[in-house]
Image (cartoon, helix red, strand yellow):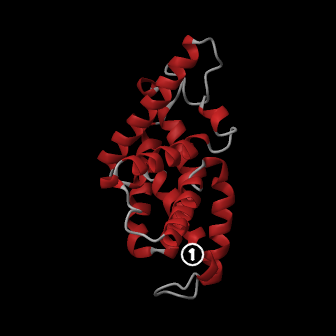
Amino acid sequence: DRAMMFNDQSIQENFHLATTFKAMQENDRINIFKNLTRNQILQVRGMVVTMVLGTDMTKHFQHVSEFKQISKEKAPQTTEHDWGQHTLDIMSYVLHACDISGQCKNEKLAMIWAERLFEEFFKQGDIEKENDMAISNLCDRGATDKPSSQIGFINVIVLPLWTIMAEVFPLCAAEGLVHLKKNLAKWESMQGDKGLAG
């Protein structure tokens, strides 16, 4: 139903945006727009929409490439950055980096988040199996190798983006990169443990 509603485009992201804006319209206590002018509402709402749609994983590699290029242009600056026309892009990249930052936390929290994510995937796989559908990648409870999937996710997805984050925003992202590399080593040490498949 959601796929049809949003024409197969950033389905979950569009759903979250629509649900949030509808809830704010219906409940003045959570309406962050209620004291803004119409022009301010349009501006802020537009920024929020752009940033949330930017968390769609189909845009990940494009965003990493763009972020890397922008960071090179601004590399000589070590204090506050004047991003100019790139400000909204940078905000989108940062939100996306936060969205996939589960393994950038200390080991205890990283493992908790990983298990929650796996359980979400496995529940999807269970539903697909019950409905005689092909089970999506990483969603097969009995066959998914947790360490290998996390190693691949970190190396291919998270590490490249967070490396740029730590270069551009060292005060707030460097610690996350340190945790990420420690957690990568932890998953690598767990690889081959048959008890961690599904």
In the rendered image, is residue 57 in sight? Answer: yes
Q: Which residue is mark 1?
A: 87
Measured as percent of width and height from the top left, residue 180 is found at 43, 55
Quadrant location of the N terminus in the rendered image? top right
Q: Quadrant of residue 116?
A: top left
Q: Quadrant of residue 70?
A: bottom right
Residue situated in front as seen by the camera: 174 or 135: 135
Q: Residue 50, relative to residue 156: is it above or below?
A: below
Query: Please, what is the three-letter code of the amino acid marked with disc 1?
Result: Thr
Measured as percent of width and height from the top left, residue 186 is found at 40, 45
Q: Residue at x 57, y 81 (%)?
A: 83
Residue situated in front as seen by the camera: 20 or 86: 20
Q: Residue at x 44, y 53 (%)?
A: 101
Q: Residue at x 65, y 19 (%)?
A: 134
Q: Quadrant of residue 189?
A: top left
Label total for image:
1
Label 1: few (<14), some or many (≥20) within 10 Å?
Answer: few
